Amino acid sequence: MLASPLLQPEIDPPKGGQGGLETAVESSQNTELSMDPDSSTEVSTTSDDEYAQLQRRFILATLAVSAFAVSVTALVFDLHIASSLLVGAVCGVLYLRLLARSVGKLGKASKSVSKIQLLVPVLLVLAVSRLPELELLPALFGFLLYKPAMILQVLLESRT
Amino acid sequence: MDSITTAASVVAAGLAVGLGAIGPGIGQGTAAGGAVEGIARQPEAEGKIRGTLLLSFAFMESLTIYGLVVALVLLFANPFAG
């Protein structure tokens, strides 16, 4: 009853209802509903684009750092170790892509982050243990190359 | 590989994965909850929040991966096997 005089002025008097409060709430909901769809869709599209661009930048940075690391390893050590590093780096990019996809689905399609991306390091270690051409440590270092790449990308973005 | 080494490796592998997943699991849950709450409060910042979440997940989950790798090495490429 205290709130009703404040909400009353622009509202028609109720016809046998509880008072002005219900009508005021209904009308405010209607205006929100009528305003929301376009603006929320626009905001969502912009955010999705922004996130897709960020994903692309992270993956490109990982590819660049991986290519640099593989070429340096091939020059300093030998091709055998460089190929292990390359396999690890490819697995790292795949892992990052799967992680980005599951983070993108969070809050929309799923309530929790899926763990499917953890299969990538498992398969990598299994492949390394089965195949004699691959070495464990270079493959693991190659897999973890996404971390310096992401740090580098964030540092470059914060400078610009 | 003798039976004691095998048993110790299997127990250590289980401990490495199990104990290594506790901390990142709690952290990821907290981070995901905070991010969803932030997106709900401020939908226009969704892209930035998701980007930060991706970055923090990538670093948090690598702790789980370390434990996973140690466990897999103990199981499939055990350096203590004679």
Image (tube, coloured by chain):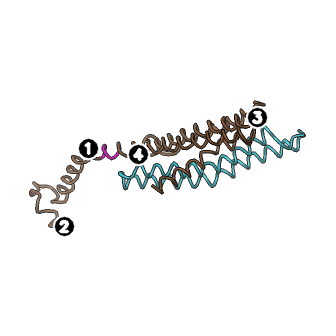
Q: In this figure, which residue is indicated by the disc labeled 1?
A: A38
Callouts 2 and 1 on one subunit = yes
Dot placed on the residue nearer the N-terminal end, 4 or 1: 1
Q: In this figure, which residue is indicated by the disc labeled 2?
A: A1
User: On the image, which quarter does residue A78 sit in?
Assistant: top right
Chain B in the picture: what colour? cyan
- Nearer to us of marks 4 and 1 is 4
Q: Is residue B42 left or right of residue B7?
A: left
Residue A61 versus residue A6: which sits nearer the camera?
A61
Provide the chain ID for the residue under circle 4: A
Q: In whole angstroms, how far apart are the C-alphas of marks 4 and 3? A: 40 Å
Residue visible at 70% across and 41% down?
A73
Residue B47 versus residue B24: which sits nearer the camera?
B47
Identify the element where label 3 is drawn: helix
Q: Main secondary structure of the magenta part?
A: helix
Q: Is residue B72 left or right of residue B60?
A: right
Identity, as a three-letter code, of the amino acid under mark 1: Asp
Q: Is residue B40 left or right of residue A113?
A: left
Q: Is residue A103 visible?
A: yes
Provide the chain ID for the residue under circle 3: A
On residue A129, which mark appears? Answer: 3
Identity, as a three-letter code, of the amino acid under mark 3: Ser
Residue A68 location in percent, x, y? Answer: 62, 42
Chain A in the picture: what colour? brown
Identity, as a three-letter code, of the amino acid under mark 4: Glu
Provide the chain ID for the residue under circle 2: A
On residue A50, which mark appears? Answer: 4
Dot placed on the residue nearer the N-terminal end, 2 or 4: 2
Residue B65 versus residue A106: which sits nearer the camera?
B65
Identity, as a three-letter code, of the amino acid under mark 2: Met
Residue visible at 60% across and 50% down?
A148
Q: Which residues are magenta?
A: A40-44
